[in-house]
Image: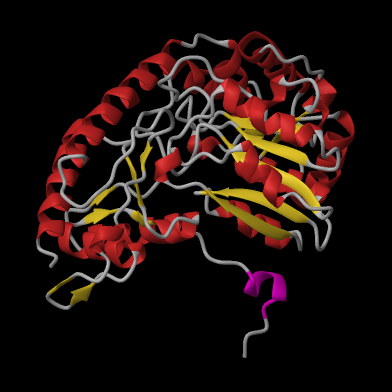
């Protein structure tokens, strides 16, 4: 008998983590698997940041930290937001959490009531709708296909807002597509939101620095909605610090106080040593951020070029992050041996077992006609992975 709480029975497991686990199991059996399923930079954390962490340990930064994070780190985040984004915040408007994932969840749990609707553009990061369900809210999915570069329009947003709408979750640069909203596109969304003062925006900007089109644009820049925007960011992607688990949100003080109240009850403040490392990340030299961005851009160009050469896949050019999200529905109904491809999850499993390349089907991202590949891996792995995928897909008929 299943005795788990109803809220857990409503949740779907993380498809990205599940696929990563399956690839690890195959690797343990001696299979040469190229893992393109997980969204994690393959670079090491920069040395200056590691040294700051070592010093923090030696200096005994080993006690409980304040629930919203150390004041020094919050001050560094305030300065980052002013310098890089032109946004004015105070330290009391910043809450540091155990990764940006917790920051997103904190914002949703702090604002969404049972029955509230939360607009989630698709393709979406797998956890957004699940977090909304955790808060007893209703995810309202708005689809944007490859033909519109996976970005919703103001008209689409306007058509789904109701009196029950409480929040929009916007991710730019996007996981899983790499799409980046321009200032004009964000203005179009902001103009719609300005007419609906009950709607808040969670702006997930964790991929801000992995951007190939120039300056990052935040929806928080528009004064008419500024007080209703909750910026979420962190050190994981830009500084190759995924395992350090430091994210933050920046928002109106009353929202931050609510998130701190919540965080104070179920995790307390984040890791003290990780915070000191993150302080160095924000306040120290930024050269490594640009070096990694350039490497990701080179890999983006490589994987787009090679994937476009595979018959049957439709590919757009991602403008940020480190994902490619090809449309693969032309293979549905095709078979090879014991395999029949009915959907993108079938395709991902086929590529894992036949080509030994781990990808993730698009259904979990709200786009069942696509699949996701992470190119946060070496040029050699990209070349070999796409060669294997091309060979495996050619067998389907």
Which quadrant would residue 27 be assigned to in this image?
bottom left
Which quadrant would residue 213 be assigned to in this image?
top left
Residue furthest right as drawn: 254
Residue 192 appears in the picture as rendered: yes
Residue furthest bottom as drawn: 1
User: Which percent across, then down, holds residue 339?
Assistant: 20, 74
Left or right, residue 243 beside residue 198: left
Q: Quadrant of the C terminus?
A: bottom left
Residue 356 in the image: above or below residue 47: below
Q: Residue 8 magenta-drawn? A: yes
Q: Give, as a single range, the part of the protein colored magenta.
A: 4-10
User: Which percent across, then down, holds residue 370?
Assistant: 36, 53
Q: Residue at x 18, y 45 (%)?
A: 385
Residue sitting nearer the eye, 355 or 240: 355
Residue sitting nearer the eye, 310 or 53: 310
Residue 196 in the image: above or below residue 368: above
Left or right, residue 262 beside residue 183: right
Residue 54 in the image: above or below residue 324: above
Q: Residue 285 magenta-drawn? A: no
Which quadrant would residue 252 be assigned to in this image?
top right
């Amino acid at each position: 008998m299943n005795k788990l709480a109803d809220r857990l029975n409503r949740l779907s497991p993380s498809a990205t983590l599940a696929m990563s686990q399956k690839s690890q199991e195959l690797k343990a059996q001696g299979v040469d698997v190229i893992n393109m399923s997980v969204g994690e930079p393959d670079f090491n954390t920069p040395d200056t940041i590691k040294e700051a962490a070592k010093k923090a340990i030696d200096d005994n930064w080993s006690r409980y930290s304040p629930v919203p994070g150390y004041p020094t780190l919050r001050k560094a985040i305030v300065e980052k937001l002013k310098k890089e984004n032109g946004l004015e915040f105070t330290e009391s408007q910043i809450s540091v959490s155990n990764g940006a994932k917790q920051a997103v969840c904190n914002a949703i749990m702090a604002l969404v009531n049972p029955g509230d609707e939360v607009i989630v553009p698709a393709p979406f990061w797998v956890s957004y709708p699940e977090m909304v369900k955790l808060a007893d809210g209703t995810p309202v999915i708005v689809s944007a296909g490859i033909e519109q570069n996976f970005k919703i329009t103001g008209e689409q947003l306007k058509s789904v807002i109701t009196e029950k709408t409480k929040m929009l979750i916007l991710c730019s640069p996007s996981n899983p597509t790499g799409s980046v909203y321009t200032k004009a596109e964000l203005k179009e969304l902001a103009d719609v939101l300005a007419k609906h003062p009950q709607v808040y925006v969670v702006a997930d900007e964790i991929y801000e620095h992995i951007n190939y089109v120039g300056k990052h644009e935040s929806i928080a820049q528009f004064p008419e909605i500024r007080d209703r925007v909750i910026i979420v960011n962190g050190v994981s992607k830009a500084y190759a610090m995924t395992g350090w688990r430091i994210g933050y949100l920046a928002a109106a003080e009353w929202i931050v106080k609510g998130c701190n109240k919540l965080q104070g009850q179920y995790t307390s403040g984040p890791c003290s040593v990780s915070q000191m490392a993150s302080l160095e990340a924000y306040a120290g030299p930024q050269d490594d951020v640009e070096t990694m961005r350039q490497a990701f851009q080179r890999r983006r160009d490589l994987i787009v070029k090679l994937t476009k050469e595979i018959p049957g896949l439709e590919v757009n050019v991602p403008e940020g992050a480190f994902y490619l999200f090809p449309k693969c529905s032309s293979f549905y109904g095709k078979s090879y041996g014991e395999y029949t491809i009915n959907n993108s999850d079938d395709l991902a499993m086929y590529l894992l077992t036949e080509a030994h390349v781990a990808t993730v089907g698009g259904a979990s991202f709200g786009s069942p006609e696509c699949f996701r590949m992470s190119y946060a891996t070496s040029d050699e792995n990209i070349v070999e992975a796409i060669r294997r995928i091309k060979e495996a897909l050619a067998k389907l008929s």
